Amino acid sequence: MRPALAKAACAALLLTAVTAVTAGCSSGDDGQAGRDTASSRSAPSSSGAGASTASPSGDLPPAKGSVRVVRTVTDGLKSPWGLAPLPEGGLLVSSRDEGTITRVDTETGKKTELGSVPGVAPAGEGGLLGLALSPSYASDHMVYAYFTTESDNRIARMPYDAKKPAGEQLGAPDTIFKGIPKGTNHNGGRIAFGPDDLLYVGTGETYRTEYAQDKKSPGGKILRLTPEGDPAPGNPFGKSPVYSYGHRNVQGLAWDKDKRLWASEFGQDTWDELNDIVAGDNYGWPDAEGKSGDSGYHDPVAQWHTDDASPSGIAYAEGSVWMAGLRGERLWRVPLDGTKEAHEPQEFLKGRYGRLRTVVSAGGDKLWLVTSETDTRGTPAKGDDRILELKVS
């Protein structure tokens, strides 16, 4: 998944940085928006496990970026969570609490319900969460979904047939992976196929902190699976599905132009994190929250006080990772130099659209952004949840 670190290190431009922080606390993605300033920045500890390096700096993103809201694609959504762009056009969006998948026409904003996912048992932060399309979607039309049942969190795939009547377009689900711990909170839920056509899964530790360090538990991990749900060949712990561990609650996954994996993670009382993910590395929870400097743990690339972020989805565009904030009610831009910050993170859209749940690349300098005001922690009076089209730099 990663370019050879030795080659990257040879061309590295080492950046030093300072820390700018503000106070805040959280124990999940609940709460209201925080203060104006936000990020703490410094390079990952060079003595940490899986220490990161920078790539050549001749093509760095600028220090200051921009965000322009091009339009509202659609509104009137209920507890939207996962988002999957269709190659034939349109977007699939999941409703966490209703357990349904809906297609949105990105030209007209028209919504067509595909159907309900059987077995979804919404409660708290659980329900129908992440969506992903099969790497062979052009031939198999399979939609993958991560969802909470009465007993666990699991992943199933379902055929999608747009020629059938609305409400009947999802075929019978085939469960490919089950037994992920469930809880009222910290269910993780983001799934995405990587450049290697393998399925990456962000899970939570459901407030059972011991799960995060237990390599036998799928809780508090990033998992890597084949499309059939088996542990991917080459995983760091033999036949285990575990790809990285020591996570609290992973809800964002994305790859940069060099096919490096990035993940966002909820902190508890002090630091939310943006991490570059290295196979087999330990990201420290519950012993470390944010940058610990402990050589046994992989430090985050960037961190924020929890009232400024509470991050969910992330996307990569224009040389930066873009991170949606729930409690923080803003979109963060983290310009990259390899696996280091090229410049200080920037905040955009603060408080303008409320809680922000999911951000997905729309190609080039465009992003799709999903709001989350109807998730029981928002303020629906601010307006129904919507999908926005953004132009960024």
Image (tube, grey):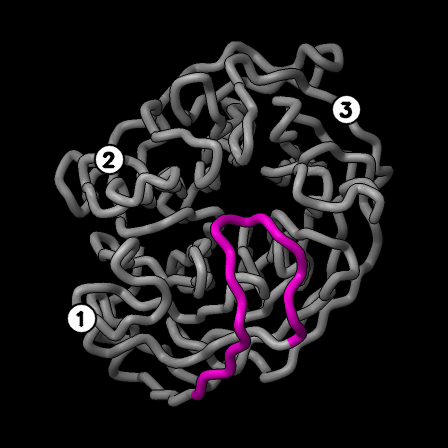
On residue 40, which mark appears? none
Residue 59: where, in percent of width, then height?
Answer: 50, 81
- Please name the predominant secondary structure of the magenta segment in the image: loop
In this figure, which residue is indicated by the disc labeled 3? Answer: 112
The residue tagged with tag 2: helix, strand or loop? loop
For the N terminus, which image quadrant? bottom left
Q: Return the mark for residue 217.
A: 2
Is residue 284 depicted above or below 373 in this figure? below
Please tell me in which quadrant of the rendered image residue 228 appears.
top left
Q: Name the residue at 26% across, 49% down.
A: 245
Q: Nearer the viewer, residue 270 or 224?
A: 270
Q: Residue furthest left?
A: 238
**Mark 3, secondary structure of its residue:** strand
Stretch of the chain drawn in magenta: 18-36
Q: Residues within 10 Å of mark 1 (few under 14, many from 20)?
A: some
Q: Relative to 390, does residue 82 appear above or below in the rendering?
A: above
Label 3–label 1 contact, CB within 8 A: no
Q: Amino acid at mark 1?
A: Ser
Left or right of 224? Residue 182 is: right
Locate residue 126, reporting x and y percent. Answer: 52, 31
Q: Nearer the viewer, mark 2 or mark 3?
A: 2
Q: Dot 1 corresponds to which residue?
A: 295
**Precedes in sequence: disc 2 or disc 1:** 2
SS category of the residue bearing label 1: loop
Q: Is residue 165 left or right of residue 271?
A: right
Image x and y of residue 253, in percent: 46, 50
Determine contact: label 2, label 3, CB under 8 Å.
no
3 or 1: tag closer to the N-terminus: 3
Quarter location, residue 307: bottom right
Q: Residue at x 27, y 77 (%)?
A: 45
Task: Name the spot of residue 104 as percent of width and height, x first.
Answer: 75, 34
- Amino acid type at mark 3: Thr
